[in-house]
Image (cartoon, helix red, strand yellow):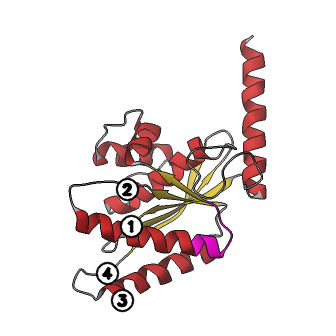
Amino acid sequence: MALRVVGVDPGLTRCGLAAVDVETNRRATLVDVTVVGTPPDVPLDKRLLAIAEGIDAWLDRHEPDVVAIERVFSQLNVSTVMGTAQASGIVIAAAARRGIPVALHTPTEVKAAVTGSGQADKAAVGKMVAKILRLDAPPKPADAADAVALAITHGWRGAAPGSQASASAHGGSAGLTGAQRAWAEAEAKARRAGTRRRH
């Protein structure tokens, strides 16, 4: 049974959205990807409304088991971080209204999960995303590829019970959806079988 993860690269100008199905053997399949957003000269309330409407439609269309969002922290550009935080809040609230668990992953986590290096650049991430998903080229623009990478990262690293990535379901399997529990149980079973074969 595949775990459906919606990855979100939050932002007001460009908010990347991806839906990815991840199987227990780590095979990932792209379901859909897009970018929603607004021009910088649009009033803030209208920008936030556009993000809210976009994420509402996306969650209703794809009905994910979990939403994975980039956890952003930076002291370099406060205005950019503010916009990212505002967009993230809207996404988290939209997921909460639907009872969908939310997970947060840092950019370094995502780079390490997808490429093997936490220092990888966007080009390397995009190239590996295309390879993992068996695509001819990375999704465009980069915000879309980043959203896909977030979804893959959660499917590979954050679906296990007790994951530190979870923002809404801490400790054990009580907070997991049925699909997440089944996914985690199948993953654990496959891991045990692999351990037995090696010994």
Report the amino acid beneath label 4.
Thr
Report the amino acid beneath label 1.
Ala
Instruction: Return the residue nearer the eye: 183 or 77.
Output: 77
Tags 2 and 1 touching, CB below 8 Å: yes
According to the picture, the residue beneath numbered tag 4 turns out to be 38
Q: Residues within 10 Å of mark 2 (few under 14, many from 20)?
A: some
- Left or right of 119? Residue 18 is right
Disc on the earlier residue, 4 or 2:
4
Picture coordinates of residue 32, whole percent (x, y): 52, 65
Q: CA distance from mark 2 to mark 1?
A: 8 Å
Q: CA distance from mark 4 to mark 3?
A: 8 Å
Report the amino acid beneath label 2.
Val
According to the picture, the residue beneath numbered tag 3 turns out to be 46
Is residue 99 on the magenta stretch?
yes
Tell which residue pokes out farthest to the top in this image.
199
Q: Nearer the viewer, mark 4 or mark 3?
A: 3
Instruction: Return the residue nearer the eye: 98 or 86.
Output: 86
